[in-house]
Image (tube, grey):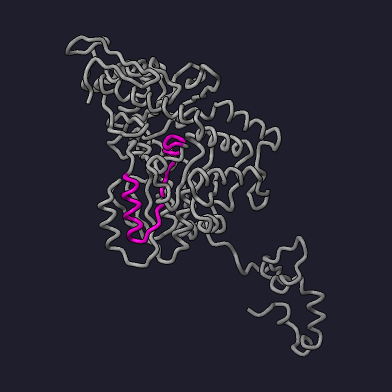
Amino acid sequence: MPCPFLGSLNQAFTRNYGAALLKQYGNYCPVISRGFRSLGNDETKCPFIQKNAIVSEAPKEMSEDIVETIPPYKYEKFFHDQISAKKKDYSYRVFRKVSRLAADGMYPQALEGTENRRVTVWCANDYLGASRHPVVQDAAVNAIKSYGTGAGGTRNIAGNSQMTEKLEDEIAKLHKKPAALIFSSCFVANDATLSTLAKLLPGCIIYSDAGNHASMIQGIRNSRAPKHIFRHNDPNHLRQLLADSPAGVPKLVVFETVHSMSGAICPLEEMCDIAHEYGALTFVDEVHAVGLYGKHGAGIAEERGIQDKIDIVSGTLGKAYGNVGGYIASSSLLVDTIRSYAPGFIFTTALPPPVLAGSLAAIRLLASEEGRSLRAKHQSNVRYLKLSLLVAGLPQLPSVSHIVPVPIVGADKVALVAESLMKRGHYVQAINYPTVARGEERLRFAPGPFHTPEMIDSLITALIDAFHENNIVFNEFMKNGTCRECSMEYKVEIGQDELYKFPMQVA
């Protein structure tokens, strides 16, 4: 449509005086005014069109059929449905209000619930009580007084403290590696290292144990590298897969020594040898072994004298060492590569001073003679609990490590037994999906050096009562504290020499 204003003027007049006309009257035009609009003008309303009613709104009858109103997505309903599904299959996780006590004579007890009821803790991964050891506590407190509670940022921006370097040197020394690198957690250490390494290595192929922890699975997924899964702790299957792999291609074999849920220990040397035979690097998670095995607490590899066969070892500062954080130890160049390329390391706030100091003190403590004494007491109590379960006829999964799994099939059943134990003063968390597969639910006991035989006896009695209370059948050997066959009194004694006296022979 021609401009109703300019169209009424003579063309010669418009050519001669167009600039002046635009300058004087341009702001009234809805098109021209967009180039030099002034505040408050509504350029969508041309005075000519509005005055002559050339355009009007469509009748309601015409518009109501073609206008479709789509309601916004119901986010809260979606979240409600997701949580309801978790509750229906008993996989919904309830975080117990448990405050562990650290004072002498109180550990391993805790205050539970709003009433602060005293309970004994059986499932914490502070395996040796390092978190409450005076040496570790004093180191953390002194670090706070000297350096504050926070790191102030990433190591690149806030600075690389001397304590950080001392801790990494100590970890490298512990694992007999040239270098180490600490992370905010071992989940991050595993994820960041595996994802970064497999992305950088050209054409890298990953061979992953079927029982690997979620952190390693996450790292493998994030790398987007091709992967093969071998059966849990099965070196023969690993060999079969590697035998079909192309020669000269970078490979990573990824597994852990002590499995967190079953307590199984891998055939470490054999798996490392097979990996190296086919030119692969070994990435071994010793999270549930560091502090607990070996002369200095370096893990299963130290205990078996094969630390040199692991190319990359990952560990945690948050379990036996009683603090928080994770790490890797390997060659200097590999560690420097992860330090330089891994986003999970580069962009994460550094560990704070009290954690650095506490972790350093804990590693040195558990590498000492006192650490060896704690490990001996720890293993004594583990054996006592396993034998007590056996004699009582209670189920337990075969475990050669410090982890004692008691299977109770059904997420509802295992939750009920855990609740029954809590009522009797024993805290152990029910383990269900997705930590373990459906149908493999269990209670996971982790007795430590500060549990006593009396505590274990009380736990066994409570566990028997909990099974009966929830109609769970088991092969009960004991009746009123005596053997059901010969009526001999059940008694197990542990002395300093770790001699065990049982009323019957136990295979």
- Which quadrant of the figure has residue 292? top left
Task: Tell me residue 279's x, y (percent).
Answer: 36, 61
Asked whether residue 279 is drawn in magenta, I would say yes
Q: Nearer the viewer, residue 408 or 269?
A: 269
Residue name at image x 56 percent, y 37 percent: 359
Asked whether residue 463 is drawn in magenta, I would say no
In the current view of this chain or complex, which residue is farthest to the bottom? 12
In the image, is residue 31 above or below residue 470? below
Q: Quadrant of the N terminus?
A: bottom right
Q: Nearer the viewer, residue 494 or 334?
A: 494
| Residue 116 can be seen, yes or no | yes
Q: Nearer the viewer, residue 180 or 188?
A: 180
| Residue 423 can be seen, yes or no | no
Task: Tell me residue 415's x, y (percent).
Answer: 35, 27
- Which quadrant of the figure has residue 458? top left
In the image, is residue 53 above or below residue 505? below
**In this rendering, position of residue 32 left or right of residue 176:** right
User: Magenta part of the protein: which range?
Assistant: 267-295
Marker count (numbered): 0
In the current view of this chain or complex, which residue is farthest to the left? 485
- Which quadrant of the figure has residue 442? top left
In the image, is residue 297 above or below residue 59? above
Task: Tell me residue 433's x, y (percent).
Answer: 35, 38
Q: Nearer the viewer, residue 437 or 365?
A: 365
**In this rendering, position of residue 179 left or right of residue 383:** right
Residue name at image x 29 percent, y 23 percent: 387
Q: Quadrant of the C terminus?
A: top left
